[in-house]
Image (spheres, grey):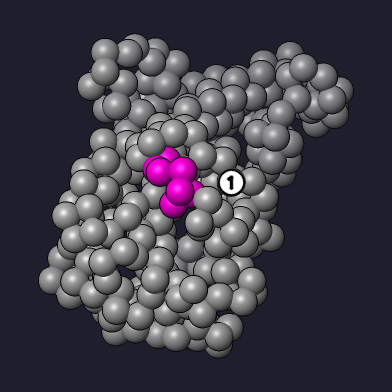
Amino acid sequence: MKVGFIGLGIMGRPMCKNVLKAGYEVTVFDFNTAAVEDLVSCGAKAAKSGKEVGENCDVLITMLPNSPHVKSALFDANGAAEGLKAGSVVIDMSSINPVESQNIAAKLAEINVGFLDAPVSGGEPKAIDGTISVMVGGEQELFDKYYDLMKSMAGSVVRTGAVGAGNTTKLANQMIVAVNIAALSEAFVLCEKAGVDPQLVFEAIRGGLAGSTVMNAKAPMMLSRNFEPGFRIELHIKDLQNALDTSHSINVSLPLTAQVMEMMQSLKIDGREKKDHSALLNYYEKINNITVGKKD
């Protein structure tokens, strides 16, 4: 099976390396030539365009920031769709609006190319060690055929329904993560203001009902005041915007999501959009005039 990979960013680069480690033949393309050279040093072949990637693969993986980038990589002049053969498949692992996933699938179907939307969760550390979670939308037959390929990058790969279901699941994931980080920030500010050591609070509650993967990943970053990404605030804003847009299109109200979205927008105004989303703590610190954790 020949694999194409477009999008070698903070997530795509380590994910592609894990595909190579699993023994697949991979052709890559990205505007970041340093990323391409890194993958070539790991055994990938470099293409000069998306079209060339499409010409040299049976299945194409895209891992890009948002739907405009995915559509551009596929459908612009010299895009991958110009090179893809009938019967090939695109697995889009980007996090985008589910409606856009369905639109992309429909356009690819016109040239007899299959499609799975398969966004991921876990951030850069899990992308590096190959333990991301993949949530997939698409036909069961295609899911079964490409399960092993997706599993080469992941700890879990679960089909949640038809095309669009993968990204709907990812939106749910991002909503839960955002609200959890906000709640953790709020609690730490309370503890700090009350004169109780947040580090000890974390150690006391992490094994109880309040404990979570989010807490275990983000509390140490907050307490050490390490807000380097990780997962950037600007990307979480994009995901929450997609969640709100989707909810409005089907008449669903998401009040907590909307509130955390505005907190993140406030951080963006403060120039912190490229920090890790654990920097939601900074929003609470600012409105309460207090600093949590290790003091600089």
**Residue 270 pos. (x, y %):** 39, 39
Q: In this view, does 73 lie to the left or right of 227?
A: left
Q: In this view, does 181 lie to the left or right of 138?
A: right
Q: Quadrant of residue 182?
A: top right
> The residue tagged with tag 1: helix, strand or loop?
strand
Residue at x-position 34% and y-position 12%: 253
Residue 140 shown in magenta: yes
Residue at x-position 38% and y-position 15%: 254
Residue 89 shown in magenta: no
Q: Is residue 130 above or below residue 178?
A: below
Give the camera-side residue of 95 and 181: 95
Residue holding disc 1: 157
Q: Which amino acid does label 1 sit on?
A: Val
Q: In this view, does 78 lie to the left or right of 115?
A: left
Q: Can residue 27 be seen in this view?
A: yes
Q: Can residue 286 be seen in this view?
A: no
Q: Give the range drawn in magenta.
A: 137-143
**Residue 37 pos. (x, y %):** 47, 85
**Residue 242 pos. (x, y %):** 32, 33
Give the camera-side residue of 157 and 144: 144
Residue at x-position 44% and y-position 34%: 161
Count how many numbered circles sit on residues in the image.
1
**Residue 137 pos. (x, y %):** 42, 41
Q: Quadrant of residue 138?
A: top left
Q: Is residue 38 left or right of residue 78?
A: right
- Binning the other alpha carbons within 10 Å of mark 1 as few (below 14), some (14 to 19) or many (20 upward) gives many
